[in-house]
Image (cartoon, helix red, strand yellow):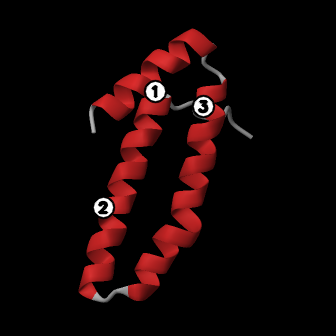
Amino acid sequence: MGKAIEYKPEEIWETIKKTVREAYFLHQEGSMREYDDRMQKVLPALISSWSAAIKDVDSKTKQARLKQLFDDE
């Protein structure tokens, strides 16, 4: 097996936001099967990856990054 690709927490966070937006529009269009796929499979996996990625960052840097992520909202 090859080496696992490592993503930065910020990259995963952007993917989470994109996935939620896509799911919202799918729900609005009535595409419930695709909506359920995003919300029940894709989103939990992304959140798990994001959680693991932020654990790899030391606590001081993590706090600064998290603050920046949420301040951008």
Categorize mark 2 by other alpha carbons within 10 Å: few (<14), some (14-19), many (20+): few
Q: Residue at x 36, y 42 (%)?
A: 14
The tag on residue 21 is: 2
Q: Which quadrant of the figure contains the N terminus?
A: top right
- Between 15 and 72, the one lying in front of the other is 72
Sequence-wise, the earlier of marks 3 and 2 is 2
For badge 3, the amino acid type reads: Ala
Q: Which mark is residue 66?
A: 1
Label 3 element class: helix
Give the amino acid type for the residue marked by disc 1 in the picture.
Answer: Leu
Q: Position of residue 34 (x, y in %)?
A: 42, 79
From the image, which quarter does the C terminus lie in?
Answer: top left
The answer to the question of whether label 3 and label 1 lie on touching residues, with beta carbons closer than 8 A, is no
**Three-letter code for the amino acid on which mark 2 is drawn:** Arg
Residue in view at x 51 percent, y 19 percent: 63
Q: Looking at the image, is 1 positioned above or below residue 59?
A: below
- Image position, residue 3 (x, y; %): 67, 32
x and y, in percent, of residue 15 in the image: 40, 47
46 or 66, which is in the foreground? 66
Residue under circle 3? 53
Task: Tell me where residue 2 sits by quadrant.
Answer: top right
Q: Residues within 10 Å of mark 3 (few under 14, many from 20)?
A: some
Vertically, is 35 above or below 17? below
